Image (tube, rainbow, N blue to C red):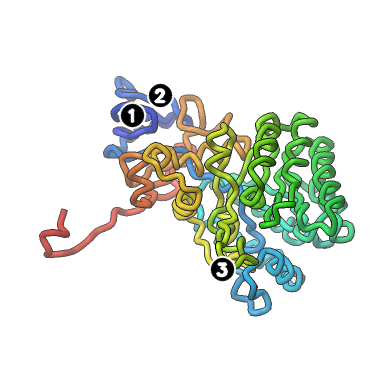
Amino acid sequence: MTRTLFANAALKGRDGLVDILVEDGTFKAIGRGAGAGVAVDRTVDLGGRLVTPPYCDPHIHLDYVFTALNPAAANKTGSLFEGIQRWSETKGGLSKEEIKARARQAMKQEILTGVQHIRTHVDVTDPRLTALQAMLELREEVKDTCDLQIIAFPQEGMYAYKGGDELVEEALKMGADLVGAIPHFEFTREDGVKSVRKAFELAVKYDKMVDIHCDETDDDQSRFLEVLAAEAYRTGIAERATASHTCAMHSYNNAYAYKLFRLLGLSRINFISCPTENIHLQGRFDAYPKRRGLTRVKELTEAGMNVCFAQDSMSDPWYPVGSGNLMYVLDAGMHIAQMMSIEELENALDFITVKGARTLNILDRYGVEEGKPANFIVLNAKSGFEAICNRVSVACSVRNGEYLFERAPEVITTDNPLLKG
């Protein structure tokens, strides 16, 4: 039996500092004096720093990462649809080994900034299913370091790409965790509706979750979200269904949005917003004023719905940058959504922790709570507000009670009295 005491930790919702006793990789006791009278193998003094559950990135495309520098992949308009076209033209020459190498590097970057849970969309509009095979192998290889969920995602459409629906189903049979779709990219609205319904049909058939790229456009007539929510409500999938992006909601008239919110509340679906990528992609066809293109994060949150943030892309045909550091994504999201009150900032970390975990459907084993796996990170801050204000780094990441990494404190050498201390 191995016991470690993490002493003097700050926890959200707890007054004062607490001690965290970890026994054989599980949270054994949490509270002031939690280790009293217990023989421990080691004690770690956290010095009042903030402990949170690990970051969750619920939406990224690991098969696309680090492909932006390919001249043939250059997206000159900066639009979503040109990005899809450039990817379609360049993806055919990729090998399983090359895809895995890029994805592994992206995961490393995310893990070193505090992520321990990732959901990736994998393009299955490829008869060879090369990227899917790569991700299935990688999921097994990294399982002791990071949980990886895989979405069977038809990037070029279930029906716009010949046999796309069959490839999605084959991907599920091979071991993908979720069903994906992209209804706003289908040739017609009827095909888009058909793709959403097919996604739920497959989810019920194979007992899978659903995560759909939904209305990632500035077109206020793109209304596949209502179809997604209705299918989630009718099939009873509820919290196992997710709508990603929903950018068109930014442009919906308020009368329609009011009606839509009732359905969204009934459906209990999750929402993923990708603020850095969507502020880059959306509004490309606007003059001035230019739309932000972000879904109604503030309004959805205030209505009690689950909304989380994600990275989406790291240097691919859709988004040329992206480091995998969710603190930067969070910072952008809070600014763009105009959620800058003290209370909102104090609770902002929820968008990349517990809300992401709820979307991933892992709350039964996630959180700094007695009896759950001892997975957590320590931030270089005393509170959530301080963490957001200073965009702080992660001091260490712990998984099953053992360190994934520790980061040495920053050392500044100076003789200037103002800069000392």
Residue under numbered circle 1: 19
Label 3 and label 1: CA atoms lie apart by 43 Å
Q: Is residue 188 left or right of residue 121?
A: right
Say which element carries label 1.
strand
Residue 43: quadrant of the picture:
top left
**Identity of the residue drawn at 35% across and 42% down:** 385
Of badges 3 and 1, the one in the foreground is 3
Amino acid beneath label 3:
Pro
Question: Of residues 38 and 278, which is closer to you in this image?
Answer: 278
Q: Is residue 59 above or below residue 362?
A: below
Residue 411 seen in the figure = yes
Q: Are marks 3 and 1 in contact (CB under 8 Å)?
A: no
Q: Is residue 236 above or below residue 342?
A: above
Q: Which mark is residue 29?
A: 2
Q: Are marks 1 and 2 in contact (CB under 8 Å)?
A: yes
Task: Point out residue 63 in the picture as x, y percentages from the top left corner.
Answer: 66, 61
Amino acid beneath label 2:
Ala
Amino acid beneath label 1:
Asp
Between disc 1 and disc 2, whose residue precedes? 1
**Identity of the residue drawn at 45% across and 44% down:** 339
Between disc 3 and disc 2, whose residue precedes? 2
